[in-house]
Image: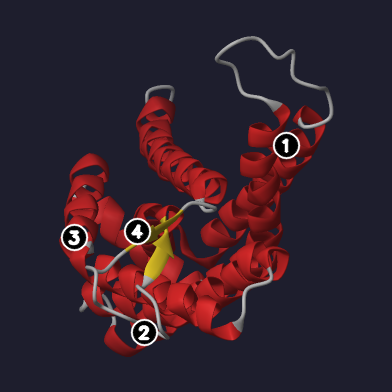
Amino acid sequence: MTGAAPAQAEPHARRDLVLTVLGAFFLTNAITAEMVGGKIIHVAPEGWLLFGDRPAATVGVFLWPFVFVTTDLINEYFGRRGVRRLSLLAAAMVAYVFVLLALTRLPPSAGFADTVDDASFNRVFGQSQWIIVGSLAAFLTSQLLDVFVFHHLRRLTGARHLWLRATGSTIVSQVLDSVVVLWIGLALPKHWDLATFARVAIPNYLIKLVLALAMTPVVYFMHWIVERYLGHAAASALAERSAQES
């Protein structure tokens, strides 16, 4: 009896470590994407026009594929409850970052040479605050939609076609996320017209779509790593239980 406790504790410890690592990547990429999302870059060669100008996208959009991968893995092994818990934690941390940014903008810069002045600091991090507001409005709803589509597809396909539920859930949920975040985070405070909004929103979504498809091998690779770490039987049982609970 005394020797059974460590043997039983080890699988739980391994599952907890998997969730902790996935959660860390999820939170880090999500918060970093919010912080850098105010930078807009061109994503097409000169001469390619969309609504009269070159298509553009935020640099933060390139970090979201890692959020997609971790969301899909958490969906697979920890179910709707795990994603909901982590999404609420992420929303709380994003709100916390909003408060921290507001507080750090209050004291004036000392004005030393080669340091960030108030105008530059406020221009960058003040804009990030608007993006955070937009993200809070869209993040939870898009995550819940992602979970719903993921598990609906899993019920239809069983354990097969991982690529379908991983990509399909991302395609649907990111329509909502891309539009809401960009509209509240940039279009409203910057007074964009509809053409400017579309010139950024459409490439933003298409980039997410292409990267979600491109990350499909990464999803399978990460599933392989989790199965090797937990053991095939334990990982399959965990995924099946998560599907039933969801």
Of marks 4 and 3, the one in the foreground: 4
User: Which quarter of the figure has residue 4?
Assistant: top left
Label of residue 220 in the image: 3
**10 Å neighbourhood of mark 2: few (<14), some, or many (≥20)?**
many
The span from disc 3 to disc 2 (Cα, nearest Å) is 17 Å
Q: Are marks 1 and 2 in contact (CB under 8 Å)?
A: no
Label whose residue precedes the other's in the sequence (1 or 2):
1
The span from disc 1 to disc 2 (Cα, nearest Å) is 39 Å
Which residue is farthest top?
112
Q: Amino acid at mark 3?
A: Tyr
User: Which quarter of the figure has residue 8?
Assistant: top left
Is residue 208 something that shows in the picture?
Answer: yes
Secondary structure at badge 3 equals helix
Label whose residue precedes the other's in the sequence (1 or 3):
1
Residue at which label 2 appears: 153
Q: Are marks 3 and 2 in contact (CB under 8 Å)?
A: no
Q: Position of residue 79 (x, y in %)?
A: 47, 64
Q: Is residue 241 above or below residue 199?
A: above
Q: Are marks 4 and 3 in contact (CB under 8 Å)?
A: no
Q: Are marks 4 and 2 in contact (CB under 8 Å)?
A: no
Q: Amino acid at mark 1?
A: Leu
User: Which quarter of the figure has residue 120?
Assistant: top right
Q: Amino acid at mark 2?
A: Leu
Secondary structure at badge 1 equals helix
Q: Amino acid at mark 4?
A: Pro
Label whose residue precedes the other's in the sequence (3 or 2):
2
Residue at which label 4 appears: 65
Label whose residue precedes the other's in the sequence (4 or 2):
4
Residue at which label 1 appears: 101
The span from disc 4 to disc 3 (Cα, nearest Å) is 14 Å
**10 Å neighbourhood of mark 3: few (<14), some, or many (≥20)?**
some
